Amino acid sequence: MAEKDTISIQLIREALLQACPAGIASGDLLKRVGIDPALFEQPEARVPASAYARLWRLLARRYNDEFFSMDPRGLRSGSLAFLCRASMAQATLGEGLETALAFLGLMLEDMQPTLVRQQSLAEIVIGEPREQPRRAFTYFTFWMIVHGVACWLAGRRIPILAIELRCAEPPFCDDYRVMFSENLQFNRPRTRMIIAADCLDLPLKRTQEELQRFLAQAPGNILVKYRDPASLARRIRQDLLQMPPVLWPETTHLAQRLCLSASTLRRRLAEEGQTYQGLKDSVRRELAVAWLGEPELSFAEIAERLGFADSSSFYKAFRKWFGCNPGHLRSLIGDGKSS
């Protein structure tokens, strides 16, 4: 499991692949940002997220590109600052996201993002002129920028229901699941991120002082502040995902398993902005989205898997979560697979 505030050395290797091809990246460059080059010989090694942030800033200055030279046009130095400044001037997160995506679409050649609203769901779809998919690292760097800025604009983590990608699954995915979502799906016809549409109505009230603090710490703050960290909430989420929902423990039993009192469990979750019921609902929503993507599963089977007494209870909960029925969401996911 990914440790808090560290990232895999494999992501450092990926960051250097196009920015510093053919071994141009010397040991001196890595040492300047506090990374021991010998760690490349240890596939399981991890480095501080702050070192990754220093590498990003160093490469951005050296090559005038804040996107690791992964696009023919790239993102010239200052792009992130301009994107944030333009987005924070908007009234809502939806308007801020549309501004950010329009800017990225102008700057980048091979990634053309759009925000699509589908009743209770919203998806950020990346249009790509190339027939061959990009590396997973390229997509996730894009999502890091978009999702990180969105979370900062809103002042809270924006839950991701699913991310679909055109590329194959890379051998190192745990960091991506920690940063974004457990529900990552590869080898799909298009690349998109799915979130709840009601997030788009969140008001934006960021100040210039807050912008300067955010930019001074970027992208390290994006990597660790708004991800789903190695916290008590993540530990509980992981445990819930390992067992059928019908076997999920009640609060008292969960507290006993964690060697905590029920009141301490509730307090520690509250400190992380979470509740146990909220975690269970979140996991159920993610599982529902994932299982609706499997057409061989009937709604009754999904309801049973999720621990509902019957299909009508599942439909009622589903409409509360997403504002639509399961068939509508299945049609959206199916469209993503067939388009």
Image (cartoon, grey):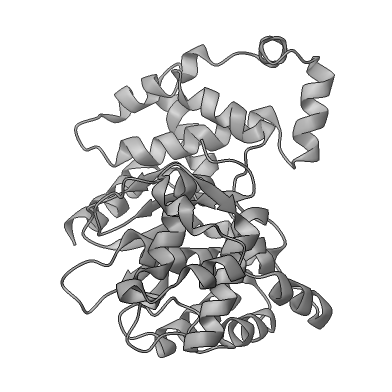
Tell me residue 77's x, y (percent).
Answer: 55, 88
Against 307, is 44 above or below?
Answer: below
| Figure label count | 0
Tell me residue 51's x, y (percent).
Answer: 61, 62
Foreground residue among 301 and 271: 271
Which residue does the image show at 34% across and 49% down from the upper left?
328
Which residue does the image show at 40% across and 61% down from the upper left?
13
- Left or right of residue 264: residue 91: left
Tell me residue 209's x, y (percent).
Answer: 83, 79
Foreground residue among 326 and 230: 230
- Find residue 153 and report its image quarter: bottom right
- Left or right of residue 196: residue 84: right
Foreground residue among 6 and 45: 45
Tell me residue 83's x, y (percent).
Answer: 58, 83
Q: Is residue 159 visible?
A: no
Against 261, is 219 above or below?
Answer: below
Which residue does the image show at 50% across and 12% down from the upper left?
247
Against 169, is 241 above or below?
Answer: above
- Find residue 165 and report its image quarter: bottom left
- Find residue 237 and report its image quarter: top right
Foreground residue among 292 and 220: 220
